[in-house]
Image (tube, helix red, strand yellow):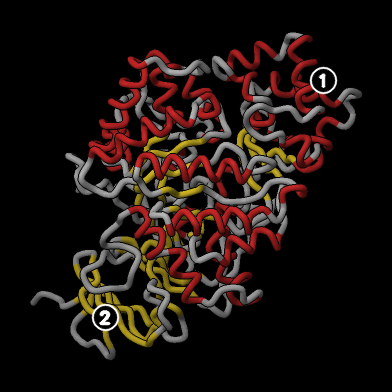
Amino acid sequence: MSREYDLLIKNGSIVDGTGAPYFKGDIGIRDGRIVRVGLNLGGDSLKVIDAGGLAVAPGFIDIHNHSDLTILAIPTADSYVMQGVTTAVVGNCGLSMAPVNPANLDLLRRYLAPFLVPGYDYGWDWRTLNEYLGKVEKRGSSMNIAPLVGHGTIRIAVKGFDSSKPTEKELDEMRNLLRQAIRDGAWGLSSGLIYPPGTYSTTWELIELTKVLKEFPIRLIYTSHIRNEGDKLVEAVEEAITIGEKADVPVEISHHKASGKRNWGKLTATLREMERARRKGVEVNCDVYPYIAGSTTIMALLPGWVLEGGVGKALERLKDEEVRRRIRDDIEEDRFKEGENWIKMCGWDGVYIAGCPSAPEYEGKSLREILGGCGDIYEGFFNLLINIGGGASIVIFYGDEEDMEIVLRSPLSSFCSDSWATAPRMGGKPHPRVYGTFPRVLGRYVRERRILSLEEAVRKMTSLPAGKLGLQDRGLIREGFWADIVVFDPNTVMDKATYQDPHQYPQGIHYVIVNGQVVVERGNHTGRLPGKVLRNPISISGA
């Protein structure tokens, strides 16, 4: 006799993702989907979870994630599923793992190196996004992966780290690579305009590429790590809105923040700008992580011109005394033409080494601690970059708690981690957001600070990002939807990861279910890999 359910969740307080008040009920799951939502569901079930006293919500969707960089090496995605994330939107900040031009592969690999898993053999045997995603599918994953394609990766494939404006022929090549990535399953185009080669692009170039998204009969989006999050924050937001308006596509402004004390308070103005744009018909939203520090590559501390030609060329330049003097002057006189002057903004004390495989003794230390005994701190810094081959990730303390809460409260914002899947065994001192983003919102900002209701916070983690991306059957507790579900205790859920001790799982996450299979049970990872690659609806390879 066939069972009515594969899994039955009983007696939960269902926070369904719409923002409506929770209600008590049961959820019946069969063949990976929710088939019944109601009271006192009966019938035979292979497994029953008693969720009495617990909240039951859609699985959390991380709209700004970089786990495409690590998921082949860490398919269990421990740090994410243990905090309730069931879907990660990857390929952000203009950086995706495909498309690959073999002639420029070394440039791409070297640029991505600080975020890749040391010692893991990626193979790099793909060229298209379809081939890369196929490799992920074959390997398996504990969470779903929804891909974007990166403008920076496309530009590297066509132009390397050449800062010149693309010729019409080069622009056509970029358009064709974007078209192919959409056919391969990408949900849109991402840009990282604070990093080379994104810094080299003009607004015109971005508009021309983003217009390609309108050639397809589905919803596709443009996401952007905008050109500046400091002194020119307002202008950078306006540029993103202009791109969306001219190309007639939805816009997602990534990890929205104001960097540096002199810029705190600008977020009120930028959110108003987004609201005005929406009234004009430009569908612009943003996402935010609940921390006042960010993370990036150590090479991002340099002016953008230094990286022309790629990381290898930059390291060669750093051996030249005249180049060193010019970089020092650019930093001290605060005259970056592109990117952020993080050292001037945050100080040597405000930048920490997060991961450095070639010199792990630096991990968890500030640049001041590492370089303080060097005599001339700039000379020590340049020598450090050469010695580690530019291969380090960093944490940067730039923000203000009250300022960040402005974005957390906004009805336009989703929550994101802006990080990549890892596990305690990987070591290093990554940003704690990789383990704690979503529980931190639920514990600190819902339960303790009360700046959001539980229902609104869950909406920002589920249906809002699902709707923005265009996922039609995820993000809600609703019959017919895929059974991506998290069961947690709203009275105890909290992040535990810290900057000095980040490899700590949160508390209060009891069960995580991905496509109907239990991936986290009573707070422990089951090792299952039921995640799917979620391709756009017109993908010729879509599931």
**Tag 1: residue type?**
Glu
Residue 37 - label: 2
Under tag 1, what secondary structure?
A: helix
Above or below, comparing residue 490 to residue 507 in the picture: below
Badge 2: few (under 14), some or many (20 or more) residues near its Cα, within 10 Å? some
Q: Position of residue 189 (x, y in %)?
A: 38, 39
User: Which residue, as the protein is rendered here, is positioned at the far bottom?
Assistant: 40
- Residue at position x 80%, y 15% from top? 325
- Residue at position x 37%, y 75% from top? 16
Nearest the eye: 519 or 211? 211
User: Looking at the image, is mark 2 or mark 1 earlier in the sequence?
Assistant: 2
Asked whether, in this view, residue 43 is left or right of residue 246, the answer is left
**Tag 2: residue type?**
Val
Residue 379 - label: 1
Under tag 2, what secondary structure?
A: strand
Above or below, comparing residue 11 to residue 404 in the picture: below
Q: Quadrant of residue 291?
A: bottom right
- Residue at position x 72%, y 48% from top? 263
Can residue 473 be seen? yes
